[in-house]
Amino acid sequence: MGDGVSDKSQRFPATLRLKKPGEFDAVFTRRSSAGNGWLVVYAARSGLDQPRMGLVVAKKKIGNAVQRNRWKRRLREAFRLNRQKLPRGFDLVVLPQSKQHPTFAALESALVQLAHRAARKWKRNHAGPDKPAPGSGQP
């Protein structure tokens, strides 16, 4: 039986998820962040050709399990549908910051914008005067 997803490129395979504590730690220690009232996105270079995402949905910020699971479902779906628009070669950790749920369109837009902003900050912070940003095409 099909899973309702006809295009294989639209799936969210396990290889695109951050799952191990070490993967999250790597993002948190080498991170750059961007946020708005709903989300904070941490980004760090991964060296892979696809973006990967991990979620941290805190009970203290979001509330009960129903609300936390709703945030996770919506963020996974936003990532899945917008994966091609996200910065390549970055691991992203997304933290919801509000009990209020934005519209899905606003959530998608915020995820893409914040991921790009965090990736730009990462590139700027990790490129010194003698060291070009990774992936800039310069030796």
Image: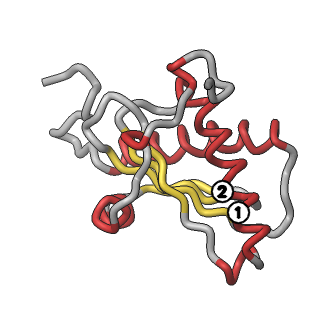
Residue at (36, 58) in percent of width and height:
27
Where does residue 15 sit, x and y in percent of width and height? 37, 40
Tell me the residue that label 2 is attached to.
72
Query: Measured along the vertical axis of the image, is residue 105 above or below residue 21?
Result: above
Where does residue 53 sit, x and y in percent of width and height? 48, 48
Q: Mark 1 touching mark 2, by CB under 8 A?
A: yes
Given the image, on which type of amino acid does mark 2 rest? Lys
Given the image, on which type of amino acid does mark 1 rest? Asn
Where does residue 93 sit, x and y in percent of width and height? 49, 56
Residue closest to the eye, 25 or 132: 25
Query: Measured along the vertical axis of the image, is residue 17 above or below residue 32?
Result: above
Most extreme residue toward the front, as rendered? 1
Residue at (59, 34) in percent of width and height:
80
Residue at (34, 68) in percent of width and height:
21
Quadrant hosting residue 128: top left
Could you tell me which quadrant the C terminus lies in? top left
Most extreme residue toward the bottom, as rendered? 60
Give the numbered dot on residue 26: none
**Dot 1 alpha-carbon crowd within 10 angstroms: few under 14, some 14 to 19, many 20 or more:** few
**Dot 2 alpha-carbon crowd within 10 angstroms: few under 14, some 14 to 19, many 20 or more:** some
Mark 1 residue element: helix
Where does residue 2 sit, x and y in percent of width and height? 62, 24
Query: Measured along the vertical axis of the image, is residue 69 above or below residue 114?
Result: below
Tell me the residue that label 1 is attached to.
69
Query: Measured along the vertical axis of the image, is residue 99 above or below residue 30?
Result: below
Could you tell me which quadrant the N terminus lies in? top right
